[in-house]
Image: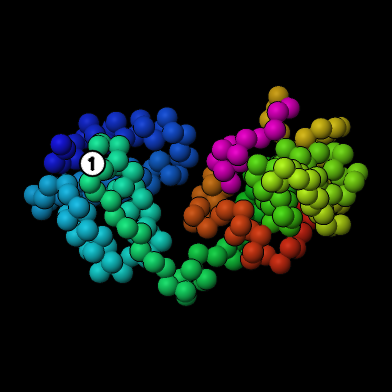
Amino acid sequence: MNNKITNTDINSFEEFLINENKSRTTLDKYMRDIRRFQIFLSDNCYPISQDTADKYIEILKNADSSISSINTIISCINTFCNFIGRNDIHCVNLKKSKTESTDSNLLTVDEYNQLLKTAINNNDYRIAMLIQVLGNTDIRLNELQYLTTHSLEMGKITVIRYSKEYNIRIPDDLLDGLYEYIDHEAIINGVIFCTRKGTPLERSNIWRLIKKLAVDAGINPDKVYPQNLKQQLGKKYYSIKY
């Protein structure tokens, strides 16, 4: 049984995360968090155990770290302990206060605008358009493959949910924007958001693009996810100047 965290453990953990296709942002965060936990244990000559993990979480709480930040660290510690075979160690996530869950974790309109501005400044019109589609429709990441040139002609996206057809209306302003986008990108037919080879973007690739944009825009990547886009922005479309 491992009683301490070694550098070999950490290096192996990093390889594990890479093989799990974790985003660069998540990978870097997990590595920082587990190294800090290692230093805490080493400085206090503590073995790794449920008791010392709980002590570490308590110190973070007393240091006024946000609940979201602490829960991210807890997730890291739990994943690491499971990886090294210490299934006897499992920290419980802290409950968020109503204020924190409704305020600090929501994406603001200013932050949304900053995402778009950054994407456009980077000449990354695909991600700028993709964010607006996610923010202005009920479409899910795994359903973007159904957004095609034919969808634009119909003014709706037909997807399959629970073995039934479900139609997602495309708002008029967004529809006009999508037509401008496919004209600019010279997309004649087929899936609108795809790779250079013409295959639909996979969910993992979309997540990577969105999280990278958040970092470039100076916004907490944890706040940038589809449901946050949908709930906070009033379904407004912003024209892109190509």
Query: Callout 1: 10 Å neighbours few (<14), some, many (20+)?
Result: some
Residue at 17 percent of width and 49 percent of height: 49
Identity of the residue furthest to the front in this view: 163
Q: How far across and how far down the image is residue 126, in percent?
A: 70, 42
Q: How far across and how far down the image is residue 103, in percent?
A: 51, 71
Residue at 61 percent of width and 57 percent of height: 227
Identity of the residue furthest to the right in this view: 153
Residue 136 in which image quadrant? bottom right
Residue at 22 percent of width and 46 percent of height: 88
- Give the main secondary structure of the magenta stretch: helix
Above/below status of 17 relative to 79: above
Above/below status of 163 relative to 99: above
Question: In the structure shown, which secondary structural element does the residue marked by tag 1 occupy?
Answer: loop
Please state which of residues 1 and 101 is positioned toward the viewer in this rendering. 1
Identity of the residue furthest to the left in this view: 45
Identity of the residue furthest to the top in this view: 197
Residue at 29 percent of width and 31 percent of height: 12
Q: Which residue is mark 1?
A: 86
Quick check: can you spot residue 148? yes
Magenta span:
198-210
Residue 15 in which image quadrant? top left
Q: The disc labelled 1 sits on which kind of residue?
A: Arg
49 sits to left or right of 170: left
Q: How far across and how far down the image is residue 55, in percent?
A: 19, 60
Quick check: can you spot residue 132? no
